[in-house]
Structures are given as C-alpha cells and as structure tokens.
Image (cartoon, helix red, strand yellow):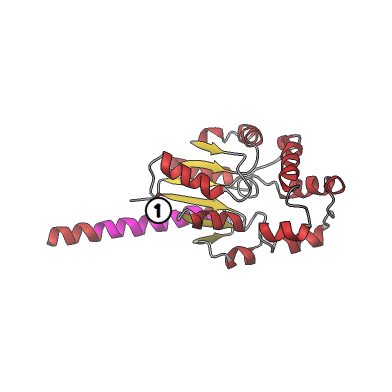
C-alpha cells in the first residue's frame, strides 16, 4: 500500500521560530536559573540532541515543564510576526493537490499553531493537529493516529527538524524525514539515521515521486507475475 499521510513537526519545520525561541529562552534565563546563550553558543547547541541540551543547560528536570509552558505563552505574543519556512506553503499545497492527508504533531500550544496557520492561509491544508505534546512523547501520538485512522506504519511519514523527531518516527516504525533548516545541525541529524535527510522543502516532493515510482514498478511486477502464473 502507498503512503497516505504526511505528518509535520511545527517549530523549525513549518514555522521559522528558531530565533524567536532563543530570544524568549534567554529572556527567561534569570527567572529559571540558567545561562543565556550567545550566537556562538547557539551553533554548538545545534549539535546536541534534546536530551543532551537539557543536561547541558543544568536546568532542574522539575523546572522543564514550567520553562516550556512559559516559552509557549511568550511565543503567543510574537506569533503574529512569525513566518513560514521559505517555500513551505508551496510544498504543502503540492502535497495536498497530490491527495496526501496532512497533519501536525507538535509540543507547541494549539492556539499558537492555529493562529500561525490562519495568518498564512494554511489552515485548510491540514486534516488534523495534535498539539501540546510531551517533549519526548510524539511517538505515542503517532501510535494513536495509526490506531484511530486504521493506518499501517508504512502509510505514514513524519517530518521534523530535531533528533527527537527521528527517534519518535523510529519508535512508531514510520518513515522519518529530517530537515536541516531547523533546530538541529545536519551532522547530528545524520547520526540519528533518518530515512531521508533534506535541505530544501522541494526535496520532499522529489522523495515522494521516487517512492511512487518504486511502488508503481513493484505493483507492475506483481501483476506481471500473476498473469504469467
């Protein structure tokens, strides 16, 4: 069976939120007792997984949920100014026109996601949104999606910009696409071995076209063997 559903992470994958997130995180550093990061330090942090990043920040694990909640809240005040990643709107429209069901699974707040999509006339492209997910719990939502929609893992692809997105896809046995324009560096994404690693949204269209060709060719071979039998 062919791929039916394409699921996206939100921050750093669809929405260009990296600089805003850093700005907000730095503004909260004194309140929550961690050090703000400068531009040079930011580049180093891009090479860390989410778990390693939390360890290096020396924030108490008990404080993490409160920090994330504050970041989401502060982001709500800036959401009007945020832009989609370049060429993402066009890519999404192409995928929708090809008949794929599109969705979002994100740890960001639903209000933030909905406002962003509405601001950029993208809300009509998505069939579902799961928001407010635990930082490391996306695989549970992917599993929920598979069960509720009666989908097989090979019918779903998950796209994200962090190592935890790759790991979530692997836990759910769905295809993973890592994008290099978001939070994690190309090097650390590659180390986590996604099924595909892309540098531009249009490459996703190419991946799907190649997969479609492979599926069509396999189907033709099966039909040929059946006729010969």
Q: Is residue 61 visible?
A: yes
Give neighbour class at mark 1: few <14, some 14-19, many 20+ (Cα, 10 Å): some
Per the image, label 1 sits on a secondary structure element best described as helix
Front position in the image: 102 or 28 = 28
Query: Does 206 lie within the magenta span?
Result: yes
The residue sitting at 61% across, 49% down in the picture is: 13
Residue 147 left/right relative to 39: left
Above or below for 127 versus 22: above
Give the residues drawn in magenta, as a range: 203-220
> Is 100 contained in the magenta span?
no
The dominant secondary structure in magenta is helix
Which residue is situated farthest in the left direction here?
229
The answer, for residue 126, to whether it is visible in the render is: no
- Residue assigned mark 1: 154
For image coordinates 43% across by 45% down, the residue present is 146
Q: Choose between 28 and 155: the one closer to the eye.
A: 28
Determine which quarter of the picture holds residue 38.
bottom right
Q: Residue 199: give x, y in percent of width and height.
A: 59, 59
Residue 204's place in the image compared with 107, above or below, is: below
Q: Position of residue 101 (x, y in %)?
A: 45, 41
Q: Quadrant of the C terminus?
A: bottom left
Residue at the right extreme of this rendering: 30
The front one of 10 and 106 is 106
């Amino acid at each position: 069976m062919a791929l039916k559903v394409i699921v996206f992470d939100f921050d750093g994958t669809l929405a260009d939120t990296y600089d805003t997130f850093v700005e907000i995180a730095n503004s909260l550093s004194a309140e929550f007792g961690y050090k703000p990061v400068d531009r040079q330090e930011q580049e180093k942090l891009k090479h860390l997984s989410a778990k390693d990043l939390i360890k290096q920040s020396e924030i108490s694990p008990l404080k993490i949920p409160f920090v994330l909640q504050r970041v989401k809240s502060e982001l709500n005040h800036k959401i009007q100014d945020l832009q989609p990643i370049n060429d993402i709107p066009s890519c999404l429209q192409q995928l929708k026109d090809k008949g794929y069901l599109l969705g979002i699974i994100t740890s960001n707040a639903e209000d933030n996601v909905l406002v962003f999509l509405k601001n950029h006339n993208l809300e009509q492209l998505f069939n579902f949104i799961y928001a407010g997910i635990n930082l490391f719990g996306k695989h549970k939502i992917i599993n929920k999606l598979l069960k509720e929609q009666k989908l097989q893992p090979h019918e779903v692809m998950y796209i994200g910009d962090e190592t935890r997105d790759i790991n979530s896809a692997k836990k759910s046995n769905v295809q993973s696409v890592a994008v290099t324009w978001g939070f994690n560096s190309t090097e650390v994404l590659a180390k986590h071995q996604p099924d595909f690693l892309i540098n531009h949204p249009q490459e996703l269209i190419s991946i799907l076209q190649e997969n479609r060709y492979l599926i069509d060719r396999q189907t033709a071979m099966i039909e040929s063997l059946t006729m010969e039998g």
